[in-house]
Amino acid sequence: MTLPASLAQGLRLPLIAAPMLRVSGVELVSAACCAGVIGAFPTVNARSSQELDAWLARIAADRDRVERPTAPPCPNLIMRRDPDAIAADLRVLVRHRVAMVIVSVGSPAAVVGPLHDAGCRVFADVASLRHAEKALAAGVDGLVLLSAGAGGQTGWVNGMSFVRAVRGIHDGPLVLAGGIHDGAALWAARVLGCDLGMMGTRFIATPESLASDAYRRMLVDSRLDDVLLTRAFTGLDTNMLRPSIAAAGLDPAALPTPSSDEARQVFGSEGSAHVRRWVDVWSAGHTVSGVDAVRPVAELVERIDAEYTAAQRETAALLASAPPRPPP
């Protein structure tokens, strides 16, 4: 496990607040960084490269005002979109010399070189061993392992199996995304072989997120069994909140299984249905049972830190009480 000093310094916890479409805005990212966890966000959440530039400047200014060490922000470049928009965002990231970027939904090959030249560590979001091998061949520094249980578009592999399989081909930085329920799960990810964990659902239920009050309340009121794996809204396996689907007037038990293009035509921002994905129907991960209240980011990080420390103590106690192992 080899997290670079440029990322490790300033971390209160080995944690990334996940990049979430329509949720991770400048307030959430800044609050996460100032609380000592990496704040990630899709660059598309900023409406233009000019706004992206303003967001990064604002986050830097907020971090400068905090007397204790702070964590870096982590922009997320989504590659399957207009190449000119990607190039414009990339120029902003290079100019700000961001410490870390996550590349998703497409090959990282086109951006690895410019980001490395700016001193940035590049991570690729992957959901299979084949994707991991391709990303490593493209020159990324680390991998974000999208496993089953992640909110929104999700992985299919058990997180424990995924980490151990990838550790067989990569000894550099690893991030586990999906199923990081609390500080105990974060510590388990570290023991498993990860450098960082990624947590999204609990950060949606903060006043700093871009989520609506109704979305936050639904997260508090929901539990694991309320998460539905469906392809209806994106054409890909996506974890959605069953109550939000019902509230939008749809039957969770009778949803279509369209292709990605068909899903966009029906449920996209300009789709034919009255229901828009991410706006009228909402996502959540398997960790939703861990959302018991809407809390400010600083308070949430305090709780996760306490959970993490308690898990470390429990592990130490287990090791101390274990009977001596016989020699081989």
Image (cartoon, grey):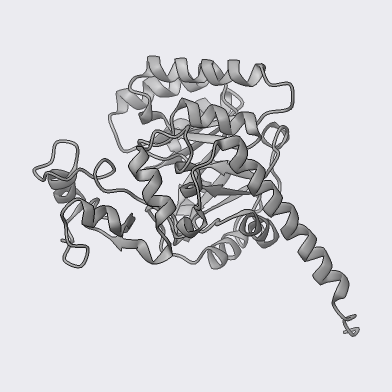
Q: Quadrant of residue 275?
A: top left
Position of 16 compared to 312: left or right? left
**Image location of residue 197, percent across then percent down:** 59, 50
Position of 178 compared to 272: left or right? right
Asked if 123 appears above or below 131 in the picture, the reply is: above
Position of 168 compared to 101: left or right? right
- Is residue 19 among what the camera can see? yes
**Image location of residue 18, percent across then percent down:** 49, 42
**Front residue of this view, candidates 258 and 288:** 288
**Front residue of this view, candidates 15 and 259:** 15
**Image location of residue 108, percent across then percent down:** 44, 39
Total labels: the figure holds 0
Asked if 231 appears above or below 89 in the picture, the reply is: below
The residue that appears at 52% across and 56% down in the rendered structure is 290
The residue that appears at 61% across and 44% down in the rendered structure is 15
- Is residue 105 among what the camera can see? no
The residue that appears at 55% across and 34% down in the rendered structure is 39
**Front residue of this view, candidates 3 and 227:** 227
Q: Quadrant of residue 21?
A: top left
Position of 276 compared to 212: left or right? left
Task: Name the image quarter holding the C terminus.
Answer: bottom right
The residue that appears at 74% across and 26% down in the rendered structure is 68
**Front residue of this view, candidates 256 and 129:** 256
**Image location of residue 293, percent across then percent down:** 50, 48
Asked if 175 appears above or below 89 in the picture, the reply is: below
- Residue placed farthest to the left in the image? 272
